[in-house]
Amino acid sequence: MQDDFKQFRDKMLEDPATRAAFEARRPAYLFALQLAELRRQRGLSQAALAKRAGVTQSEVARIEAAEASPTFDTMARLLSAAEADLDIRFKDARGKTVRLPMTLKGAEHAPRSRRGRGIAAKPTGVTPTEAVAERSF
């Protein structure tokens, strides 16, 4: 089944317009594929992952379908709910790391608004640096 999808994808990407659209959304597609695989490996349904992360099941479904581009906060919450961390690396055009890696941990402490997005409705008492960023050396 995976080979069928790969063949279909490769055939679709032969069209320059389709390839350009895919490349523009590549990060969302890659995150979607990896999140869905991690969720399945952990034996979680979309609803269970959503409940753990404090988002809706439909939001998880849209992210896994690459129909939505999640914020860093949402990515960190989803991965934390699946017992994983978001590891960010900055690379130049040759693939060389240009900054120290940063892993976002403790996303459950990150401020959330009443709608689940943006600035928090109530302060958590934890600074963003303490809550979500831990530099790895």
Image (spheres, rainbow, N blue to C red):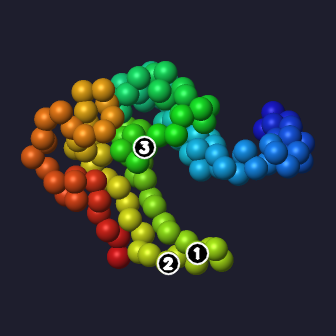
Q: Which numbered disc covers residue 71?
A: 3
Amino acid under disc 2? Val
Q: Position of residue 49 (x, y in %)?
A: 42, 29
Please tell me whether mark 2 sits on a helix, a strand or a loop: loop
Amino acid under disc 3? Thr
Q: In this rendering, would 127 be left or right of 12?
A: left
Q: Earlier in the sequence, mark 3 or mark 1?
A: 3
Please tell me whether mark 1 sits on a helix, a strand or a loop: loop
Which residue corresponds to mark 2? 98
Residue sitting nearer the eye, 44 or 114: 114
Please tell me whether mark 3 sits on a helix, a strand or a loop: loop
Q: Position of residue 60 (x, y in %)?
A: 49, 29
Report the residue that reaches farthest toward the left.
125
Please name the residue shown 33% across and 35% down the image. 117
What crowding class fits label 1: few (fewer than 14 Cα within 10 Å), some (14-19), or many (20 or more)? few
Q: In this rendering, would 115 be left or right of 121?
A: right
Amino acid under disc 1? Asp
User: Disc 3 to disc 2, how far (Cα)?
Assistant: 23 Å
User: Disc 3 to disc 1, how far (Cα)?
Assistant: 23 Å
What crowding class fits label 2: few (fewer than 14 Cα within 10 Å), some (14-19), or many (20 or more)? few
Residue sitting nearer the eye, 20 or 12: 20
Labels 2 and 1 touching (C-beta < 8 A): yes
Q: Position of residue 113 (x, y in %)?
A: 25, 33
Q: Position of residue 15 (x, y in %)?
A: 88, 45
| Residue 96 in which image quadrant | bottom right
Which residue corresponds to mark 1? 92
